[in-house]
Amino acid sequence: MPERRVTVASKVGLHARPAALLAKAAAGQPVKVTIRKDDGQPVEAASVLGLMTLGAMHGDEVVLAADGDGADAALEAIADIIATDLD
């Protein structure tokens, strides 16, 4: 299963608006994308509630994972969003 590490760029972390934008983008991918902090349990990236409970703050590194056709492109698209300041 391909994985991608990325640093959270939004000043408020993955909370509220950034989480909503990320969840919408993840839901539009052809594969299920999960996200986790290094030692945490993965949550579905398409879930706003899951993203907010992740507790990912500005500067934290998160790990994205996906499996199936289009996984690499999906990870790239989601990583680009996380690496952008969405505030």
Image (cartoon, grey):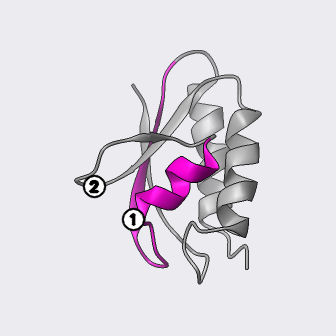
Which range is magenta? 47-67
Residue where numbered disc 2 is placed: 38
Residue 61, given in percent of the width and then of the height, sits at: 39, 65
Q: Answer yes or no: do the residues labelled 2 and 1 have beta carbons within 8 Å?
A: yes
Of the residues shown, which amino acid type is indicated by label 2? Asp
Quarter residue 9 falls in: bottom right
From the viewer's perspective, is 19 left or right of 24? Answer: left
Quarter residue 53 falls in: bottom left
Q: CA distance from mark 2 to mark 1?
A: 7 Å
Q: Is residue 40 magenta?
A: no
Query: Which secondary structure lies at badge 2?
Result: loop
Residue where numbered disc 1 is placed: 61
Disc nearer the start of the sequence (2/1): 2
As rendered, which of 75 and 16 lies closer to the eye? 16
Residue 44, given in percent of the width and then of the height, sits at: 52, 38
**Residue drawn 70% across and 23% down?**
30
Of the residues shown, which amino acid type is indicated by label 1? Glu
**Residue drawn 52% across and 69% down?**
8
**Residue drawn 72% across and 56% down?**
20
Q: Residues within 10 Å of mark 1 (few under 14, many from 20)?
A: some
Taking 82 as reference, is 3 above or below it?
A: above
